[in-house]
Image: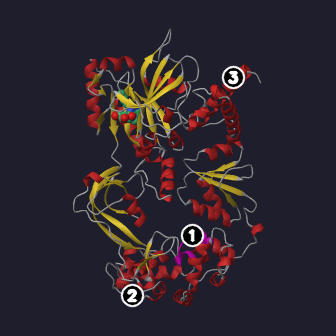
Amino acid sequence: MNDSELIQQVTSLVEKLLKYNHEYYVLDSPSIPDAEYDRLFRQLQAIEAEHPALIQADSPTQRVGGIALDSFSQVQHEVPMLSLDNAFDEEEMRDFNRRVQERLKTTAAIEYGCEPKLDGIAVSLLYRDGVLVRGATRGDGSTGEDITQNVKTIGSIPLRLQGHDFPEVLEVRGEIYMPKAGFAKLNQQAAERGEKTFANPRNAAAGSLRQLDSKITATRPLQMCAYGVGHIVLGQGKALPDTHTGILQQLQAWGFLINAEMAVANDIEACIDYYQKLGTKRDDLAYDIDGIVFKVNATELQQRLGFVSRAPRWAIAYKFPAQEELTVLQEVEFQVGRTGAVTPVARLKPVFVGGVTVSNATLHNRDEVERLGVMVGDTVIIRRAGDVIPQVVAVVPERRPEDAKAIEFPSQCPVCQSPVVVEEGEVVARCSGGLICGAQRKEAIKHFVSRKALDVDGLGDKLVEQLVEQGLVESIADLFQLQHQQVAGLERMGDKSASNLLAALEASKSTSLPKFLFALGIRQVGEATARNLAQHFGKLEAIVAADEEALVEVADVGPIMAGFIRSFFADQRNLDQITRLCEAGLNWPDIQVKAQHQLPLAGQTYVLTGTLETLSRNDAKAALQELGAKVAGSVSAKTSVLVAGPGAGSKLKKAQDLEIEIMDEEGLQALLAKY
Ligand code: IVH
């Protein structure tokens, strides 16, 4: 190949790859399979490796990160990067609108552009003749830092603008953020490596952009969404649309990601409606938002309104209630769970966050306490987003009081005083008291009667606690010896409720083997595993007799779980309980054991992706395996069905490309219910 042919090939590869990249990261609809993209990418990489002079600044290969910097250099913003005024209620929104109307000397309704306020980091991207030449942080608004190397690694940032009608110089402004799913994965990986995790997606995005080594940034799941323009040199005969939303649509046409929720509101009341509607969707969005930004839509009106100090008069951020707040960790108590796990629980100065008052938060285990570096007396950041239980996400070190106390883990169980042990390879400390421990007994009984286990109607946590505290019940088998008078004599119980409870206990005796196995509370044996064990062995006697070798044959049972199952049934006390339960009349039908090839999903391969809401990934996997399916980690031509929840990404795209059947969670539930 001669030089000009080579240049032509490089140019054509770059162009194709930029297009595919845009389809993938911005449009979310790739036109070619990943493998084809990879092939073209490697082809370009190979040519560039041999002829470094041919590497174009906007070559997609430059997204992987370059040489690490010693420091970021400074950048002067030609047009200052402003911030926004805030509104916290409807009145403040109406006041804002009134001010706008007064300044414009009009009573006519003002049209606003509405967009979510993304919780990330503001960025300025400078394009000259359509090529990205500089990326910068906001800094103090006039001077930012040059993060060009880092922004180039972000897939949704065009390295070159699409089309030809763009201004000679175009500065695009927007937010770089980390979607929730990517954040969760990044933190999980960090935690597994014992590294410090990020408090929230915003900190993760900021930390990722602050890397001097852009190769690290390249590994972080960052997105960029455009929300405006800065410095512009239009060039001959060119113009921009005359509304804010029009400009954003133009940016979209040039290759940027803009927010899918963007809308136009005809007046301030429509803005308030938009705010409320999006508020109800907030937790379901794939990214964190902390409010809605409303901008006077007509650019001509924007110019007439101008700025005050650091904020434009034509825009406002209407904030949502905070999902993070500061409070003080007043004390740490230790709770003992069903399996003896001794969990540190933070008692907090009550704080209103994410719509509720929070006064407790789990600190999980010793590793978590160490990772957070938290002490009693510390000011901590509490996060409660959506239905997720409140978390202590970080400590504010500057606010540590002098008398802060280290969190001491007890060496004895706070309930039964048995030694607390940490088994090898585990992080969780456990009370070694087993069923001697009142706490474990209570929890074991609560679990036994819970909905997914024996499902004893009307036997709630409080009643179980009373029964144990009054000495009426020491173990699960004792439940079935309860007498009417004993129950009727309890606090808040009477004849009627006692009869109801005894009837519910009676009714719960007819159960199924999977439910019974799950109810026993064997460590790590969840519903799905219980089902698999039952399906595999058919009879309780066979499970009791199975050795570890036989147990690991069961779908989803590994050597560790097999060990737990073995030691449960090797304990005479547990066997005695089972005997007593059977004598009391507990019964279930045996299960017809099916050979593997007779199972309904035999020969099929399933892949799970995205978030599942009604069951965990592991439970879904086990349930599918139990029906004979294989569950694989990646999509290939051999995949029969992809189960995709919200947040599904590349696997979903690949499955679509390969025309593989795609099922949502509802479909999966329907499938599982069928068998
Ligand atoms: S407009 C002149 N639009 O919020 C208008 N800002 O204090 C300047 N932000 O750090 C900003 N989403 O990065 C605008 N849709 C949006 C936004 C947004 C997030 C951030 C912005 C800045 C802060 C404003």
Q: Residue at x 46, y 89 (%)?
A: 481
In the rendered structure, are the residues bearing label 1 and label 3 in contact, judged by CB atoms less than 8 Å apart? no
Task: Work out whether residue 629 or residue 195 is closer to the camera in this orientation and state it.
Answer: 195
Q: CA distance from mark 1 to mark 3?
A: 61 Å
In the rendered structure, are the residues bearing label 1 and label 2 in contact, judged by CB atoms less than 8 Å apart? no
Q: Secondary structure at mark 3?
A: helix
> Is 552 on the left or on the right of 94, as rendered?
right
The residue stretch that appears in magenta: 517-531
Q: Which mark is residue 7?
A: 3
Q: Secondary structure at mark 1?
A: helix
Q: Amino acid at mark 2?
A: Leu
Q: Which mark is residue 527?
A: 1
Task: Name the image quarter holding the C terminus.
Answer: bottom right
Whichever of labels 1 and 2 marks the residue nearer the N terminus, that label is: 2
Whichever of labels 1 and 3 marks the residue nearer the N terminus, that label is: 3
**Which mark is nearer the camera, 1 or 3?**
3
| Residue 279 percent location from the top left of the image | 40, 43
Give the class, few, some or many, for how many residues have Cα within 10 Å of label 2's Cα (few <14, many ≥20): some
Task: Work out whether residue 104 or residue 224 is closer to the camera in this orientation and state it.
Answer: 224
Q: Residue at x 41, y 49 (%)?
A: 200
Q: Which mark is residue 472?
A: 2
Task: Work out whether residue 145 or residue 353 is closer to the camera in this orientation and state it.
Answer: 145
Q: CA distance from mark 3 to mark 2?
A: 86 Å
| Residue 181 percent location from the top left of the image | 51, 49
**Which mark is nearer the camera, 3 or 2?**
3
Q: Amino acid at mark 1?
A: Glu
Q: Is residue 675 visible?
A: no
| Residue 217 percent location from the top left of the image | 50, 41
Q: Is mark 3 within 8 Å of ligand 1?
A: no
* Residue 276 is one of the magenta-drawn residues: no
**Which mark is nearer the camera, 1 or 2?**
1
Task: Name the image quarter holding the N terminus.
Answer: top right
